[in-house]
Image (cartoon, rainbow, N blue to C red):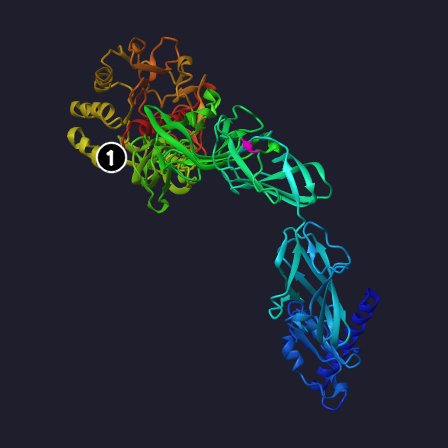
Amino acid sequence: MNNTILNKVWNCSAVLWFVAMFFSIATALGQGGINTTKIKDGSVPNSEVTASKTAVLELESVNKGFLLPRLTNSQRNAISIADKERGNGLTIYNIDTDCVNYWSKKSSRWLSLCGTLPPATVDIVDCTNIYLETGSNVKKLKQGEYLKDTDLLYMTVTVKEAGTYNISARTDNGYSFSRSGTFNTTGVFTISLEGIGTPLAANETIGDLVKFTINGTENTVCNSFRILVESSALDFTIVSQDIEASWKAYIGVPLTAAKNTIKVKVNVTNKGYWQIASEPSVVNGMSFSGSGVFNSAGEHEIELIGQGTPKAHTPSNQPTQFSFKTNSTTGDNPTFKLKVHVLPVDFEMVCDNAAYPVEFRGEYKQDTEINRNNAILLPIKVKAPGVVPEMTLNGKLIGNGINVDIKYVAKDVTLTFNSARNDIQYVAFYPEKTQIIQKGVTSIKFTGITPASAKWCGDVFPEIKVVEQLVRYSVQCSSIVVNGNYLVNTDISQNSISLKINVDYPGAYSISTNTLNEVSFSASGTFDRAGQHVVELKPSGNYKQGGRLTYMISTDSQSGNTVCSTTVNVVNRDIVVLTLGHVNYGASPSGNTYAGSAILNSVKNFSPNGIVNVNSIRVLTTGYQGEHLRNYIINNKVDIILNVIGYNANQATLSVFDWFVKTEKGVLIINDENTVHTSSKQFIESLTGQSVGSASGKFTMINPVLNSAKDESIIKGPFGDLEGKYIGNDATNGWYFDGVSNNSQLTPLIARNDGSGAIWGLKHKSLGFAFFGDGGWIVGTMTNTNTSIWPSKYTADGTPIAKPYDRGSQVYNSVLYANLMAWAIEYVKVNKPIK
């Protein structure tokens, strides 16, 4: 059937099939009326609900198909189509031919939608009526002669079902017969199968057995038909003597027709099909053979092709030798032998070649396992291919005091030539055994390879750098403990933040916080084992302000930087001030409008957010002397003592003063006037161990600040700079020391206004002590304007200010007082422990 006919069959078949399918389904779904149906599975969103106007039935899906009944040929043929009209277009899926079939009324048969007729059903009529026609009277073939178009095999067949056919007759002697086509009708036909090929061997007695196949199925009925092959009476002799192959063979490398052949000269007496093969057929994994046809007598050169794979190396003086047999009528044993040299496997390392570097696979870390993931790919130059049973790389684990053997092995390595890569191939070496890289190992250095013939690269062979295994740990954020009290300007070196640490891998660690309010926390050291540890973060710096501070804790763990947070509550210190004497001249426990209380109680001046940061200031007063005073100071945790007019210390109290200043690190401020009490002079000299000279009641109403004291914090303080300023006496009660400059422990601050060098105000250079020569220099109010008494003045919010005073001067007593208290509080914060 030509292509035009096939296309017509296909087009007509397709139309009939679709018409029949829709017509049949419409009949099932519509009963008597005009109905159209649409079946949908919902896989197409927003589609039409009704069928197309041109369709009786519409099926809709994007992930499902339409399944036809699936039948075999026999099941299909068993369908009885009595009503040819209504059965026209009946459709099934043929599972034998893997194609859709439909019944055609016009053809009165099943047709295929695959574009061809279905295979015909054919049987051979008579196995004894199969015969060979050679175009001559001889009904047999001849050895070595190609089959011609006149060499035909005839048979009679019965066609039970028309269709396509492919019939073949095969032998095992180099030739066969076949024919294909189409039987358009049933019946009995005689057909001829065309021959092809060349009979290789003679078979004059029983002949070559022929096997028949019809449409892919072997015929088992006609299984004894044979074809005789007449001998060609081939006769030839070998001219060549012993031959040595011009090429080299390699262990494990298969011989090929392109490279491994030998040329042999022969002298042909009678032409025909020839065969020569090594005998025994295989030696050292190799064989040689050849065949062909001598079409003329005389001398010929033939080619024998090597096959197989050399198995073993043969020494140069003992090559592999082959004998041969032929199909020549003069004898089977030629007089020549073939010698083939099989070279041993040979290779060398490729050293320091950027195009073919050594490749190291996997990770190499301390305290980790070396296993098959840690392969080494080594470039090898193949000089003679073959199989190497074992290759070994020998090396050492190197570190501080560490020198441990390590071995990498490659087994049963097949080396092959590869001209595209300059005969270089990579060989994978694997650790001989699982091995731990212990802590301290820094590199793996290789020292040699076996077999030694590979020529070791020496120092140019790269080392493997071993990565140091760094510490891994995590912080239990929920277990953080803040230890100690945190006060402004207070030593916190004994405080800490405690952390519970889960250590996965030990090693050196560093943990720290951010810096807040000039303070940070940190710790460093070494975890000597895995498991739980407690780390104390120690502070650095001192707090300058109070408040709740949230610290972020960061680690150097290699398993991830664990970040936790914790809060430190920094409080300003509570200060206790004790006034000894008249409270109006110092500070009052109940507070009043006098400068000493008003300035001290101002939140602008002294408070958590004031100019001087304190949590609170509590003022006390008492008339106790001696040990009673000591107990009072201890019990009330007194920080600062103001000794003003109205309190004269006895000898026992002077001892308490000395203890308070030297031992308790408190601040003592003595304001004495008029006739300086012997006790004041005595205390100063006892405290310093040096004389302060004589005391004098000769006074001036205003007293200048010494230029030498301009940088002292009492003079240049947070409430004002008193350089070049004056401090006033309250009335005519000033008192002075005239030998202070000779006392190395004291710092003169304020002098008498006559240039005599007499000192009105002084402080100790290292201890918390100050003296001022007027018992009432602090006193004053907001509104008093008298220019000879109450020299302190302040504003409504407690801000200390200058007061107009004697002879048009300005005195800064309230500023001095505020600076003095700021100095005293700072001294206490730094030096006096909290009890």
Residue 481, quarter of picture: top left
Whether 339 is among the magenta residues is yes
Residue 181 falls left or right of residue 471: right
Whether 113 is among the magenta residues is no
Residue found 60% across the figure and 32% down from its top? 421
What span is in magenta? 336-340
Residue 806, quarter of picture: top left
User: What's the amino acid at mark 1?
Assistant: Lys
63 above or below 185? Answer: above
Residue 798 falls left or right of residue 482: right
Residue found 84% across the figure and 66% down from its top? 4
332 above or below 211? Answer: above
- Picture quarter with the N terminus: bottom right
Q: Of residues 484 and 196, which is closer to you in this image?
A: 196
Numbered label tally: 1
In the rendered image, residue 140, in percent from the top left (x then y), is placed at 69, 58
- Picture quarter with the C terminus: top left
Q: Of residues 728 and 216, which is closer to you in this image?
A: 216
In the rendered image, residue 243, in percent from the top left (x then y), is placed at 59, 30
Q: Which residue is tagged 1?
A: 835
- Residue 678 seen in this snapshot: yes
In the rendered image, residue 828, in percent from the top left (x then y), is placed at 31, 28
- Residue 610 seen in this snapshot: no
